[in-house]
Amino acid sequence: MKPYSKILSFAAAGIFTCFANVSLAFSATQAKPIEIKGEIIDTWCYLSGVMGGEDAVVGSAHHTCALWCAAGGIPVGVLDEDGQIYMVLKLKGEGSLAKTDNIMEIQSDVITAKGMHYVRDGVNYLVVEDVIANEGITNLNHLDYGSVPPNSFPENFLSKQ
């Protein structure tokens, strides 16, 4: 056996073991049914603070930026009434979230959804099976914070000022 063949055999065995361990870890995560109410948020801006504090990067103040981020593939989340964030993995009947109009249509809205809740390494994940209520954008914080980033007011809220 040539020396590089042994190295490749060991590497292949290591990779197989790694994937087997990851597969077992994911299968050990138990999903639980959940009904959740909260705002659909832009997780990057909310968690990183790049656009400002938590009060400024939600609601109508951050709606346009949240649309840009979602369209660009940044994962969306649900910020529940207790301040917990659930990363949305999938909406019912949808494939990749970055390519759907449905996630764009509910960005910054307060929704009530039923789905499956997963927890992995302390992070909440949500597979939305059904949006059972949509209150729209209820957090009109652009009146207090302007628009984050500036000059990106949602069109339908300009008339409310």
Image (spheres, rainbow, N blue to C red):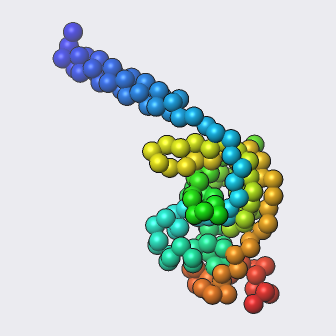
- Picture coordinates of residue 153, whole percent (x, y): 68, 81
**Quarter of the C terminus within the rendering:** bottom right
- Picture coordinates of residue 21, whole percent (x, y): 41, 27
Viewer-nearest residue: 84 or 136: 84
- Picture coordinates of residue 93, whole percent (x, y): 75, 43
Query: Does residue 120 appear anywhere in the picture?
Result: yes
Name the residue rendered at 68%, 41% in the picture.
Answer: 33
**Quarter of the N terminus within the rendering:** top left
Examine the rendered structure and indicate whether residue 15 appears above or below residue 149: above
Q: Quadrant of residue 80 in the image? A: bottom right
Name the residue rendered at 20%, 13% in the picture.
Answer: 2
- Residue situated furthest front in the rendering: 82
Query: Does residue 89 appear anywhere in the picture?
Result: no
Name the residue rendered at 74%, 71% in the picture.
Answer: 137
Name the residue rendered at 74%, 52% in the picture.
Answer: 113
- Residue situated furthest bottom in the rendering: 161
- Picture coordinates of residue 152, whole percent (x, y): 64, 80
- Residue situated furthest top in the rendering: 1
